[in-house]
Image: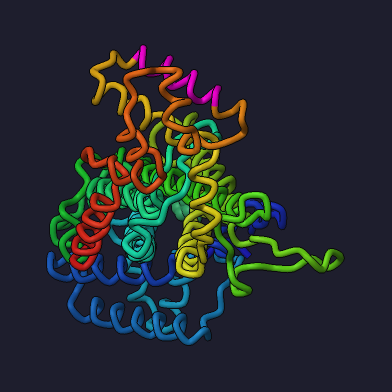
Amino acid sequence: MSNQMWGGRFASGPDAIMEEINASIDFDRKLALQDISGSKAHVAMLAATGIVSADDARAIEQGLDTIRGEIEAGTFTFSRALEDIHMNIEARLAVLIGPAAGRLHTARSRNDQVALDFRLWVRDTIDALDAQMHDLQQALAEKALAHAGSVMPGFTHLQSAQPVTFGHHLLAYVEMLGRDRSRLHDARARLNECPLGAAALAGTSFPIDRMKTATTLGFDRPTANSLDSVSDRDFVLETLGAASICAMHLSRLAEEIVLWATPQFGFAALSDKFSTGSSIMPQKRNPDAAELVRGKAGRIIGALTALLIVMKGLPLTYSKDMQEDKEGTFDALENLSLCLAAMTGMVRDLNPDLARMRAAAGAGFATATDLADWLVRSLNMPFREAHHVTGRLVAAAAEKAIGLEDLTLAEMQAVEPRITKELFDVLGVDKSVESRTSYGGTAPVNVRAQAAAWLAKLANS
Ligand code: ARG
């Protein structure tokens, strides 16, 4: 059977393999509700401008409402022979209301239609992801406030560097998510132009009102260039870019949870709710959800790369290659949503072992920098010299296999005679973090204030 949309030019139907490669209905059915919203805005504009009669417009709108009901109820029959969501809905409309259905596609093409539908879907998804990122920030900031004074080792090169607080560490991720959300907001602002009315590529000779459809659909304005309108997928790429960076952040936190949950670190444990066992090793508790968040970052970043490669060779304007924009995007953004939900659950579930964190924070001469700073402050020693003196004190302690704070005053004075007993005031891990009051530093007083400031901010946005 030849196609009911372009059957005029075609004598026969497609080869089976043509239908197999061409049909997108198996995945673009996800755009059904956006397609109906777009069509309703379009037909309302066609009626307002006198391009279709009020009676036909009413019949079309009622038919579209019926179809929406069928889709929501799960009774709509999607057909691969009808290729994509646009033609599936239009064909059903023709069955429901007869020839008037054929007027809906006036001054429109599937090229501007799919550009519109996908924009609407991405916009809805951005809003949902933003809300999830907010929830994760909330969980992190609440835990940060509770642990503003809990000492843990801070790392560089994954070697213990200086003591920090667990709250400070968690707030680092709140900052990252703040930038992730800001990137999504930026993407949304640039996305929010309506491509409907660009038609196939060149615009239309019908007296359409693009401002009206744009406003009806919640866009700031219509897109300015019809060629760009049907060939642009920047809004997807920007969203996938923001999603990839966020996924990378979640993956880094997931990696830390994996490390913390090992018996070797023992910094924090996940409860049974977020752990799995081994079918052979009874002692095992595996942080599978964290590992999956780390793993899924790969496929999310992959979707960005895939679409960049699809787009890079395309001449203006629409080419069917662009149908490949959807599956990876759906998959990536749905998986990011899953990762955000899982990470929020894990953060709330995470139970830190404060004693182990504290012990590890003090190990490895972690307060050596504090000692050097004391020499600079109290003895007016140049920092380079203080670094050298401290190095000798570390060597002395290491030789005896004791901590810096366990050296006697006499032993210290053997290295630097001007050292006084006041030096011992800066050597414990608590003293160390309490002293780091510089803006953005790890002092509990700072962390408490920053966590509270974030929580206040998150209460409004
Ligand atoms: N299913 C198509 C897509 O997703 C819709 C646009 C088709 N346009 C065309 N000229 N064949 O890209």
Q: Position of residue 44 (x, y in %)?
A: 20, 71
Residue 387 shown in magenta: yes
| Relative side of 389 to 18, left or right | left
Q: Residue furthest right?
A: 280
Q: Where is residue 197 in the image (x, y as percent from the top left)?
A: 25, 53
Determine whether 212 is above or below 221 in the image. Answer: below
Give 430 or 442, whichever is nearer the viewer.
430
Q: Where is residue 125 in the image (x, y as percent from the top left)?
A: 38, 61
Q: Position of residue 97 (x, y in %)?
A: 37, 83
Q: Where's the C terminus, which quadrant? A: bottom left
Q: Quadrant of residue 33?
A: bottom left
Determine whether 458 is above or below 184 in the image. Answer: below
Residue 258 shown in magenta: no
Determine whether 412 is above or below 72 in the image. Answer: above
The part of the chain drawn in magenta is: 384-396
| Relative side of 362 to 131, left or right | right
Q: Report the residue at 49% width, 42% height from top.
A: 304
Q: Quadrant of residue 135?
A: bottom left
Q: Which residue lies furthest to the front in this view?
A: 410
Query: Can residue 231 be seen by looking at this rendering?
Result: yes
Give 34 or 247, whichever is nearer the viewer.
247
Per the picture, the main secondary structure of the magenta-coloured stretch is helix
Here the colouring is rainbow
Give 18 or 149, whichever is nearer the viewer.
149
Q: Where's the N terminus, which quadrant? A: bottom right
Give 324 or 209, whichever is nearer the viewer.
324
How many numbered circles are shown?
A: 0
Query: Can residue 114 be seen by looking at this rendering?
Result: no
Q: Report the residue at 35% width, 50% height from top.
A: 168
Q: Report the residue at 57% width, 36% height from top.
A: 402
Q: Report the residue at 34% width, 44% height from top.
A: 431
